[in-house]
Amino acid sequence: MRILPSLNALRAFEVVGRLLSVQLAAEELNVTPAAVSHHIKVLEEQLGVTLFERGHRSITLTPLGKIYLTDISRSFEAMKIATMNLTEMKQRRTLKIRAYTTFSMKWLLPRLSTFHAHYPDIEVSLTTSLQAVDFANEDVDAAIRLSFEPSTDMGFDRLVPNELVPVCSPEFRAEHPELNDKTPESLSNVPLLHSLARREDWAKWLDAAGVRGVNPLAGLSYDSSILAYDAAARGHGIAIAQKVLVSDDIDNGKLVMPFSFTLDEGSYTYYLVYPKERLTNPELAAFRNWLLSDAALKEDPRAD
């Protein structure tokens, strides 16, 4: 038959074993010394083991009592930690956001620390996907999507301008001085870097810039924009990039723009999208306000 001592008895044993005093244990547990002694007696009877040696005015642990105290103390410490973790999780509020991988890594994640500084009790659970979000059937509070102005039955806010620019490493630019505003046709002589998720970008930019004689599909393709940007930074060629996603790399000199022409795609840009009724969620309202005031508007005054 398995012995299952009561939690009160085990707690009394742990405190007495730690303090080696029934009186002090009673004070810590806010009970009488007689109640503590009773718990210890019942526990010893249940276990069939003497846990304490009683002296005239002292109490000490037996060898078996010392071993049992070590094990019991670990269990109580584990319960204490588990309770603290649960309490902390209850106090922290989780906001679930869906975004694109490149946007998350190149724009959102570098800025999230400021959100956490302002709202330490709100935990952002960020997932990435190219797929549209189904708010009715998915556990997502809001999403950052690249599109034309979303449907009016949804809540949405424009975040940043969406401008296309060619970028390359400073070393690649130095090796190809012919890449300049006067000779954009020289792009036909260098590897163009593409993202498979945005296959039309080079064609859009070349057409808007009036460049002829350059095959917009030539060059090297990568699974995502972030890989294409990284390849450009490593000197593998020249990538067509969303300027807002490489602005940090341009500022720190990792990438340069050999051409001054930028293609602004207007209303086709990044939006924070959410069911209108969810703005009553204080976590989502806080995240939205932060994006618009602390992040997007500081990024570019045209973001409205």
Image (spheres, rainbow, N blue to C red):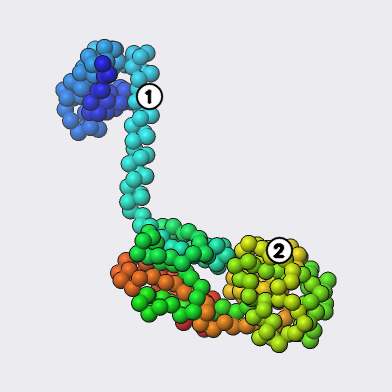
Instruction: Give the number of the disc on residue 231.
Output: 2
Question: To which quarter of the image does residue 19 belong?
Answer: top left
Left or right: where 127 falls relative to 60? right
Q: Are marks 1 and 2 in contact (CB under 8 Å)?
A: no
From the top left corner, tell me how far across and down residue 210 is, in percent.
Answer: 71, 87
Measuring 64% from the left and 76% from the top, which residue is drawn there?
Answer: 201
Describe residue 160's horizontal placement relative to residue 233 as left or right.
left
Alpha carbons under labels 1 and 2: distance apart = 56 Å
Which three-letter amino acid code belongs to the residue tagged 1? Asp
Side (left or right) of 249 relative to 274: right
Q: Which residue is mark 1?
A: 71
Q: Give coordinates of residue 38: x percent, y percent.
A: 18, 20
Q: Residues within 10 Å of mark 2 (few under 14, many from 20)?
A: many
Tell me what residue is drawn at x 33 percent, y 41 percent.
Answer: 83
Q: Amino acid at mark 2?
A: Ala
User: Could you say whether the residue bearing mark 1 is in a helix, strand or loop?
Assistant: helix
Residue 118 sits above or below residue 81 on the image: below
Q: Which is nearer the eye, 13 or 131?
A: 131
* Image location (x, y in percent) of residue 234: 74, 63
In the depicted structure, whether residue 17 falls above or below residue 220: above
Q: Is residue 261 visible?
A: no
Q: Which image quadrant: the N terminus?
A: top left
Q: Residues within 10 Å of mark 1 (few under 14, many from 20)?
A: few
Name the residue rendered at 79%, 86% in the picture: 182
Of badges 1 and 2, the one in the foreground is: 2
- The dot on residue 113 is none
Going by the image, does 235 lie left or right of 31?
Answer: right
Q: Where is residue 282 drawn, in percent x and y?
A: 33, 66
SS type, badge 2: helix
Q: Who's the residue at 32% across and 47% down the image?
A: 87
The answer to whether 71 is drawn above or below residue 162 in the figure is: above
Q: Is residue 46 visible?
A: yes
